[in-house]
Amino acid sequence: MSETVTLDVVRRVAELALLELKDDEVVRMQKDLNAILGHIDQLNELDTAGVPPMAQVSEILGGQVEASADALREDLVRPSIDRTAVLREAPEADHRFFKVPKVIER
């Protein structure tokens, strides 16, 4: 079993993530994180010695990759929206970027 997540660990992670959690949210987050770690422990018990590593989910289809290729669009460079036209419609912008209100005070 993985080491369990304590309330202090949840509070520290929340602080690092700039999240303000209420006490009941800290308790719920601790429960959820420990459940996730428990599930990972279960997955780690599986014998995957004969399972080849893969980088794409489509590899799981084996010989059916070509048949499902229609579901994947071709990766092509295409024209995008006109930046100048979009910035002209923004409530506030400089010459290159949208201006938005500050949301993080730290």
Image (tube, grey):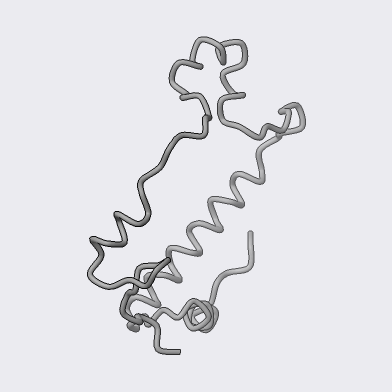
- 46 to the left or right of 74: right
Q: Nearer the viewer, residue 16 or 88?
A: 88
Q: Nearer the viewer, residue 75 or 106?
A: 75
Q: For this rendering, which residue is in front, 63 or 102?
A: 102
Query: On the rendered image, what quadrant is the N terminus found in?
Result: bottom right
Question: In the picture shown, does residue 61 fall above or below 49?
Answer: above
Q: Is residue 34 above or below residue 85?
A: below
Quarter of the figure with the C terminus: bottom left
Determine whether, in the image, residue 8 is placed left or right of residue 91: right
Please tell me in which quadrant of the rendered image residue 9 appears: bottom right
Residue at point 59%, 47% (across, down): 42
The picture places residue 64, in percent across and down from the top left corner, at: 55, 12
* Residue at the outermost bottom position: 106
Residue 76 on image: x %, y %: 52, 30
User: What residue sits 63% from the left and 68% below the top?
Assistant: 3
* Whole-percent x, y for residue 6 in the image: 53, 77
Q: Seen in the image, is 59 located left or right of residue 7?
A: right
- Seen at 56% across and 15% down, the residue is 65
The residue located at (57%, 69%) in the rendering is 4
Total label count? 0
Picture coordinates of residue 93 (x, y %)? 32, 71
In depth, the one of 29 and 67 nearer the eye is 67
Extreme residue toward the right, this view: 49
Residue 88 quadrant: bottom left
Q: Is residue 47 above or below residue 13?
A: above
